[in-house]
Image (cartoon, rainbow, N blue to C red):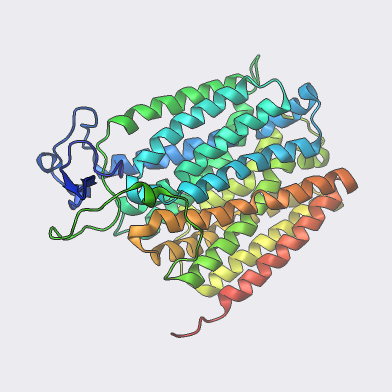
Amino acid sequence: MADLSPAGSGLRTAQFDGRRLSEALLPLELAPRAQLQLASISRWNALRGVRVGLVAAALLFMLIGANLATPIYLLLQQRLALTPLDTTILFTIYVFALVPVLAAVGHWSDHLGRRALILPAVALAAAGDAVFATAGSFWQLAAGRAVQGIAVGLSTGAAGAALGDLLPERPTLAAKLTLACSAGGVALGPVVGALLAGGSDPLLTPFLLHAVALLALCVPLAVVHPRMPGRNRPPASPPRITTPAHLRPQRLALPATGRREFLLASGAGFVSYGVFGVYLSLAPAFSAKLLHSDSRLTGAVVAALLLGSSAAAQLLVPPTADRVVIALGLTGLAAGLGLVVSAQYTGTPALLFIGSVLGGACQGVAFRSLFTSAVAAMNPERRGSELSSLWVIVYLGSSLPIVGVGALVQACGLLPAVSGFAAVAALVCVALAAAVAKRPKQA
């Protein structure tokens, strides 16, 4: 896959002002084996398609793991006497751990390489599985969720940037894979968790098997030879210098180019991930009342409908830059929310399923298009940093709203809380649709 350390062991180094420098300046993605001077550990000069697959698998598996517990929370509530607010806090702890890490180290992959963050993140996610599987109290569950959040925070910007590095001539495909793996992992997590939780130990089995899968993925990630990020640089260019100053936390800032695209993508991501977060935490309870079923798998399927439809749309619907189509997508998400709420008031389960699929598919088309435009406008040398800034805003959407909704559930009940949130989210979607449809000012 794309990248590791300042040079990757085996590449030439130089001395400059007493510092060890990296000369990882080769046109690297298709460089021949002899030119790479492969080191003793990372000798596998894998094909580009294999590297793309490894990055996508790492992102998909980690997000599946972060959502394995969704259908098991009702069981955890019974065993550990958790309240609905405790459950929503567990969801937000994951994001509150993820966002600071993403903000503080998101730019590291631009200097150290993508694999330098992705490989330890996958191993750390396996450790998070172990903590969560053996938890016997709320605080142990919280610790497991925090570890999972740190792992995803380490890898989110690096994985998206790695796909961009590996597919420089196909930015739409890189964005499509990034978002499909993200939404697909979040959608598959509850379903996989429900299927694996059907055995004699529903708390241990899902996390143990997932940890084994992550550790197995670490093997090819460790042996593939790393490549450096960014554009090909002329041979006469000076070596890239990485010092501790480069790795200090940086203030989040708008990118120098493509700010309108960045703001629209981050705004759409914030509201849609807010919807995702509320769905994942409350859909099992919401659907259990409507469908008169306490089945973990039923609740997981309902929770996965929205995100699965989003991932499918991102993979199957042709890309578009048409402002009207994108605006209609955001409006469709608002309409889907209205149908979901109407299902509960009218007692019509069909509206729940139709609204979930409609909202997810429309979100997938709109957000993928906005995300692709934002990434295409980013500086390749700072893609990891700028992508991390975008994801910080997006992930805040899946944490801040759910805290308020969880408090409202305890104060006024499930349906009024979800209805109020859906109304606010729908209004934001319509406002974003209007902003997208408005023709941008010419420079």
Specify the quadrant that holds the N terminus: top left
Residue drawn at (86%, 52%) of the image: 416
Q: Is residue 183 left or right of residue 378?
A: right
Q: Nearer the viewer, residue 380 or 330?
A: 380
Specify the quadrant that holds the C terminus: bottom left
Q: Is residue 402 left or right of residue 305?
A: right
417 over 258 or under it: above or below: above
Q: Nearer the viewer, residue 364 or 159?
A: 159
199 over 185 or under it: above or below: above
Q: Nearer the viewer, residue 94 or 73?
A: 94
Quadrant of res 95: top right
Q: Is residue 143 left or right of residue 420?
A: left
Q: Position of residue 303 (x, y in %)?
A: 67, 42
Q: Position of residue 205 (x, y in %)?
A: 59, 19
How many marks the image carries: the answer is 0
211 over 379 or under it: above or below: above
Q: Is residue 347 visible?
A: no
Q: Position of residue 44 (x, y in %)?
A: 22, 33
Quadrant of res 138: top right
Q: Position of residue 320 (x, y in %)?
A: 46, 67
Q: Is residue 172 left or right of residue 322?
A: left
Residue drawn at (13%, 43%) of the image: 32
Q: Nearer the viewer, residue 180 or 45?
A: 45
Q: Is residue 125 visible?
A: yes
What is the residue that sits farthest to the bottom in this orientation? 442
Residue drawn at (59%, 63%) of the image: 267
